[in-house]
Image (tube, rainbow, N blue to C red):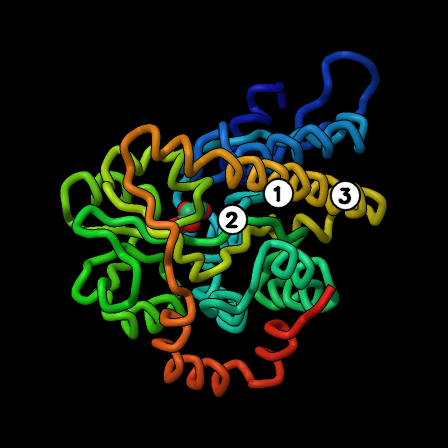
Amino acid sequence: MNYFGLIRGAAMTGVAVAALTAGAAQAQTVMRINVSMPQDGHHGIAIDTFAEQVESLTDGRYQIETFYAGSLGAERESIEGVQLGTLELTFTSTGPVPNFVPELSILDIPFLFRDYEHARGVLDSEIGDELLGRFEAHGIKGLAWADNGFRHMTNDIRPIASPSDLDGLKMRTMESPVHIAAYREFGILPTPMAFPEVFAALQQGVVDGQENPLSVIESNNFDEVQQYLSMTGHVFSPCVFLMNLDMWNQLSEEDQGHFVTAAQAGAEANRARVDADEETAIESMRADGMEIIEDVDRDIFIEALAAVNAQFEEQFGAEEVAAIRDWQP
Ligand code: EAX
């Protein structure tokens, strides 16, 4: 079979194996990874770094093709693709993950994490390793946790400083049952929707608002279609590198180590970009005319969730929740 035949076959099976034209008969395997965010952002830098690292650590035996802005599908479809093996890898927020690994919804509990140090510390600890391992029973290998970021609310109706301001607001949410239950408790009318549809839904007024980390709000120009941003920080949203489990099992042990190292390097670059965005995004969006409400009383938001929090403790186990909530560096 010639090179093009191999590539065409690869498009069907998902993995391209092409003989390198230069040099001896060393095979090269091409894999794809995608994100729903633009290349210039905290997801883009994660997969760009991962791709560079895989190629360099495996001396070019593995080549990673990168796709951005949902061009290969939204996050839920991408995880499904990785599970089925029609896509080799994806980097995704955990928003749609509960559809595949329901118990990972524990990470979606509002106000579970105090700050970035806490969230990253837990994800990089044994607790995080154990949770990452939960993907395997579902045909998926979790390579490394990373950050999407602390989520804040935007809307186009009124400034939000306390839960009573949220009453009756129609807000796009991720497809996470925990988020949906909690946001209802705030009085929000949750409208779950895949991310690639969100900008148009905000622009056309299909929903009044949405919630996302600063890195997402800014890199997707939501400030163009949303007047108010409230610094609620109500949920920490992780990201994760995922790979099809069969393809992972086909890697040599040494290459498995390289893929994990590369994903960890991607996570490091991602977190550095999140830190940089956190420094600059507020001022830059304010300069563009967005009204930023920084004075948010989080305690009132936390109190509003008392009943639903009790429900989450029952669902996930009070000890499990406490182990994350009370984690100390
Ligand atoms: O992955 O769906 C969401 O709101 C996510 O935070 C976003 O797509 C980043």
The span from disc 2 to disc 1 (Cα, nearest Å) is 9 Å
Residue 83 vs 105, above or below: the answer is above
The span from disc 2 to disc 3 (Cα, nearest Å) is 20 Å
Q: Nearer the viewer, residue 157 or 198?
A: 157
Residue 1 vs 305, above or below: the answer is above
The residue at 29%/70% (across/down) is 186
Is the C-beta separation of discs 1 and 3 under 8 Å? no
Q: Position of residue 9 (x, y in %)?
A: 54, 32
The residue at 53%/50% (across/down) is 82
Q: Nearer the viewer, residue 289 or 3?
A: 289
Residue 99's mark?
A: none
Image check: 183 left or right of 201?
Answer: right
The residue at 77%/27% (across/down) is 56
Q: Secondary structure at mark 1?
A: helix
In terms of sequence position, does the residue under pointer 1 or pointer 3 come before the other?
3
Query: Badge 1 local density, few (<14 within 10 Å), some, or many (20+)?
Result: many
Residue 77 in sight from this viewpoint: no
Residue 192 in sight from this viewpoint: yes
Query: Badge 3 local density, few (<14 within 10 Å), some, or many (20+)?
Result: some
Q: Nearer the viewer, mark 1 or mark 3?
A: 1
Q: Nearer the viewer, mark 2 or mark 3?
A: 2
Q: Secondary structure at mark 2?
A: strand
Q: Position of residue 112 (x, y in %)?
A: 53, 69
- Asked whether mark 2 lies closer than 8 Å to ligand 1, one says yes
- The amino acid at mark 1 is Arg
Identify the image quadrant of the C terminus. Answer: bottom right
Location of residue 124 (image quadrant): bottom right
Q: Residue furthest front?
A: 295
Q: Nearer the viewer, residue 191 or 30?
A: 191
Residue linked to disc 1: 271
Residue linked to disc 2: 148
Residue linked to disc 3: 261
